[in-house]
């Protein structure tokens, strides 16, 4: 039985024809909505990296280790890499239905 590429985590990333500034705002909003804290944003040419931390369930434990969300330009489209699935769904909804 052949499994779909998306089920195996090998799906091609979906691109969005939006400005990088708009993509950063949408990504920050989606991360905060899902309980993450954005630490910093680094821009390097066509690539932007958002560093964020997930909050632990117990507030006494503080924050989790830092993680990265990469926004890179591929041709005329922006692609989101290393993004949690629930955040990627939120980004997809906000960029496709303004």
Image: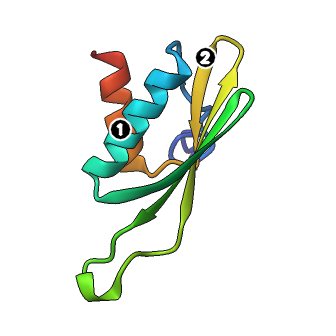
Q: Which residue is mark 2?
A: 77
Q: Position of residue 48 (x, y in %)?
A: 63, 37
Q: Nearer the viewer, mark 1 or mark 2?
A: 2
Side of 20 where 89 appears, left or right? left
| Residue with the most extreme right position | 45
Task: Out of 16 and 48, give the one closest to the viewer.
Answer: 48
Q: Position of residue 78 (x, y in %)?
A: 59, 23
- Disc nearer the start of the sequence (1/2): 2
* Number of the label disc, if any, that sits on residue 45: none
Q: Position of residue 86 (x, y in %)?
A: 35, 48
Judged from the image, the secondary structure of the residue bearing numbered disc 1 is helix
| Residue with the most extreme bottom position | 60
Q: Which residue is mark 1?
A: 89
- Which residue sits at x=44%, y=75%? 64
Task: State whether residue 58 appears in this view.
Answer: no
Mark 1 crowd level (few <14, some 14–19, many ≥20, 10 Å Cα): few
Judged from the image, the secondary structure of the residue bearing numbered disc 2 is strand
- Which residue sits at x=26%, y=48%? 33
Marks 1,2: beta carbons within 8 A? no
Q: CA gap, disc 1 to disc 2? A: 17 Å
Task: State whether residue 12 appears in this view.
Answer: yes
């Amino acid at each position: 039985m052949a499994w779909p590429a998306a089920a195996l985590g090998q799906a091609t990333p979906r691109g969005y024809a939006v400005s990088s500034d708009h993509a950063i705002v949408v990504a920050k909003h989606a991360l905060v909505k899902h309980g993450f804290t954005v630490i910093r944003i680094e821009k390097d040419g066509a690539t932007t990296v958002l560093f964020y931390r997930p909050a632990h369930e117990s507030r006494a434990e503080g924050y989790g280790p830092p993680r990265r969300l990469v926004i890179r330009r591929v041709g005329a489209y922006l692609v989101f890499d290393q993004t949690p699935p629930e955040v990627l769904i939120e980004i997809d909804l906000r960029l496709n239905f303004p």
